[in-house]
Image: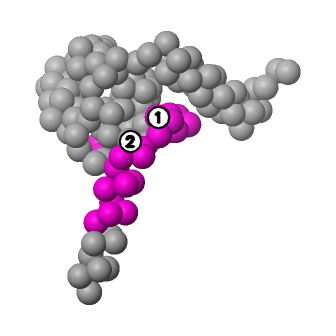
Amino acid sequence: MRNIFCIIWLIILLNSCTSTKTLKPFSSDGCSLFPDRSLIDKEDWGECCFEHDKAYWQGGTEDDRKLADKRFKDCILEKTQDKTLADMMYIGVRFGGSPNFPTWYRWGYGWNYRRNYAPLSEAEKEMARILMDEYEKSKKIESGKNSD
């Protein structure tokens, strides 16, 4: 029984040491654990969440995250004119978006390893640009907007 635990422990250690630096294709779940729009009136802030997801997907430095979160808050306020809602959603992303949380909506969630806060290299920026272009092209094809 002890050998089985040793083997499992070794596999876990090796897996954590051999992580690759691959950015997964972009995905967005909208506002994650929050509605994308008002349940009462016609206010819709889903676009703010989508833009915020683009920043969180690729990750970057702590300052990049702070800027993404501020832009998110400003977008919510612009869309809704509701300071309380904008503040509440901002607090939610500041608290829940840490790169150290093992969640699908954390800072840098596009990376398949624990990246934490780190500036993107030029090669990583290019990888993110290519993947975002592929995502946008696939959405155009899905919606029948492909003019090629």
Q: Nearer the viewer, residue 57 or 41?
A: 57
Q: Badge 2 is on which residue? A: 113
The residues colored magenta run: 9-35
Amino acid type, residue under disc 1 in the picture: Lys
- Whether 119 is drawn above or below 35: the answer is above
Q: Nearer the viewer, residue 53 or 3?
A: 3
Circles 1 and 2: CB atoms closer than 8 Å: yes
* Image color mode: one colour
Residue 121 screen position, x and y as percent: 44, 16
- Answer few, some or many: residues within 10 Å of disc 1's Cα (few below 14, many 20 plus, some between 14 and 19): few
Amino acid type, residue under disc 2 in the picture: Tyr
- Answer few, some or many: residues within 10 Å of disc 2's Cα (few below 14, many 20 plus, some between 14 and 19): some
Image point 31% across, 22% down: which residue?
118
Q: Badge 1 is on which residue? A: 21
Residue 12 screen position, x and y as percent: 33, 60
- Whether 132 is drawn above or below 67: the answer is below
Q: CA distance from mark 1 to mark 2?
A: 7 Å
**Relative to 80, is 20 on the left or the right?**
right
Residue 7 screen position, x and y as percent: 34, 71
Q: Nearer the viewer, residue 87 or 1?
A: 1
Of the 4 image quadrants, the one containing the N terminus is bottom left
> Is residue 79 visible to us here?
no
Q: Is residue 17 magenta?
A: yes
Residue 119 screen position, x and y as percent: 34, 17
Image point 66% across, 33% down: which residue?
139
